Image: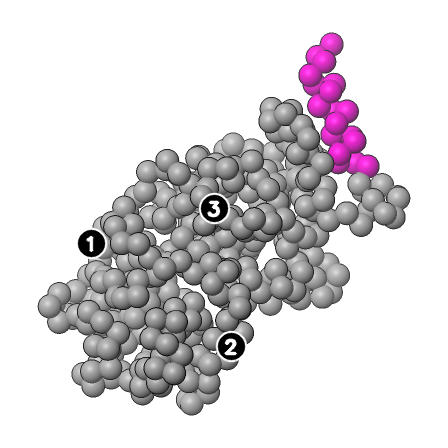
């Protein structure tokens, strides 16, 4: 008789099936509470129980802001390791992702197990109570600045933000090198900006000071900016020559396009900042153990190596970065501690200055 196998199956019954029984008090346990029960087990036994429980759940639903092809590659790599799980994905960024999760919970039908989003969305999701702490064993390989004490957020990757320009339309010495340069009349109508860059807006207001920063934004808004949702979309339009400049792009996207000989390059304006992107567990995740297995893998050396192969910067210690040049400068990191207290005000002020006047 395989004692280890029987032991694992017994614990699976205790930790997995009982919470879904008829006892009302137990049935109300959240995803994080269910997973906390595994923390008392030694690492190997914990992993064995988690795998068996995930097999019983059979699938996982993952919402992410990653590019579609990257999301597909990530889930395929996960499936090579855990082929018994079907991975359902839904891609959206910014307010769309937040609204989808909020709508599910408001209707009493949460579908998502794991969410990947920026610090802005992470803060907003936590505020409305749809996330649960999950202290993945992999968190020990991340510095304290890349995770929160409570266990809600762990960095999946970070995005250094850069100014991108079309190299066929501008020579290097013609490119703006400061935010003040962007106010030059010659750039009127020549620049892209995202229509939800609340992190960028907040960083600059803190850099300039509130009143000076707001005045700067009002002046920049007079430059007839082309506002488009999505930094990837802006990068593609920049490469196509639709405009010569995009004020805030993802550094890894620019370098990936450049590596494929697209006419694009970048400069890092001051203040240079990065947007932290986190992986989080849904409070009422329908497949909590499968979700935990996915989080653990995504934060592991294997998962983080897959993510940085896309060019993204990862925070796990010891992983070789594809574009180390994005780490040559120390950025301001937009994390929940930075953005949460000012997100509502920053988003309102951005809309008033850049959107409502149109």
Give the residue at mark 1: 261
Could you tell me which secondary element the residue under label 1 belongs to? loop
Could you tell me which secondary element the residue under label 3 belongs to? helix
User: Magenta region: which residues?
Assistant: 1-18
Residue 136, position in %: x, y? 57, 39
Residue 141, position in %: x, y? 46, 37
Task: Give the mark nearest the N terminus, 3 or 1.
Answer: 3
Give the residue at mark 3: 144
Pick whichever, 271 or 100, lies toward us. 271
- The answer to the question of whether label 2 and label 3 lie on touching residues, with beta carbons closer than 8 A, is no
Front of the two marks 3 and 1 = 3
Total labels: the figure holds: 3
Quick one: quadrant of the C terminus?
Answer: bottom left
Q: Say if 43 sits above or below 23 in the image.
A: above
Q: Residue at x 70, y 52 (%)?
A: 284
* Residue 203 visible to the viewer: yes
Q: Residues within 10 Å of mark 1 (few under 14, many from 20)?
A: few
Residue 147, position in %: x, y? 50, 48
- The answer to the question of whether label 1 and label 2 lie on touching residues, with beta carbons closer than 8 A, is no
Extreme residue toward the top, this view: 1
Give the residue at mark 2: 345
């Amino acid at each position: 008789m395989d004692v280890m196998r029987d032991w694992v199956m017994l614990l699976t019954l205790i930790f997995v099936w009982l919470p879904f029984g008829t006892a009302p008090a137990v049935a109300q346990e959240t995803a994080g509470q269910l997973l906390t029960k595994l923390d008392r087990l030694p690492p190997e036994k914990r992993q064995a129980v988690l795998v068996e429980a995930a097999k019983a759940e059979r699938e996982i639903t993952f919402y992410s802001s990653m590019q579609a092809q990257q999301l597909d590659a990530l889930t395929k790599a996960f499936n090579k390791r855990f082929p018994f799980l079907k991975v359902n994905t839904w891609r959206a960024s910014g307010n769309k992702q937040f609204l989808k999760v909020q709508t599910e919970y408001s209707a009493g039908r949460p579908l998502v197990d794991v969410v990947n989003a920026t610090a802005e969305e992470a803060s907003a999701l936590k505020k409305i109570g749809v996330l649960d702490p999950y202290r993945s064993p992999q968190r020990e390989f991340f510095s304290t600045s890349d995770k929160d004490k409570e266990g809600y957020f762990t960095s999946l990757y970070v995005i250094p933000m850069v100014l991108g320009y079309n190299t066929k339309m501008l020579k290097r010495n013609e490119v703006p090198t400061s935010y003040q340069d962007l106010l030059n009349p010659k750039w009127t109508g020549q620049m892209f900006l995202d229509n939800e860059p609340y992190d960028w807006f907040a960083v600059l207001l803190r850099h300039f000071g509130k009143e000076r920063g707001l005045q700067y934004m009002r002046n920049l808004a007079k430059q007839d900016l082309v506002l488009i949702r999505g930094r990837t979309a802006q990068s593609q339009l920049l490469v196509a020559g639709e405009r010569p400049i995009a004020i805030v792009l993802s550094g890894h996207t620019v370098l990936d396009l450049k590596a494929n000989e697209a006419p694009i390059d970048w400069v890092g304006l001051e203040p240079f900042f990065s947007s932290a992107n986190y992986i989080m567990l849904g409070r009422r995740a329908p497949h909590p153990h499968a979700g935990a297995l996915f989080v653990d893998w995504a934060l592991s050396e294997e998962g983080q190596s897959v993510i940085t192969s896309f060019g993204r910067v990862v925070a796990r210690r010891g992983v070789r970065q594809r574009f180390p040049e994005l780490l040559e400068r120390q950025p301001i990191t937009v994390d929940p501690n930075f953005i949460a207290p000012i997100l509502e005000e920053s988003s309102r002020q951005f809309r008033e200055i850049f959107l409502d006047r149109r």
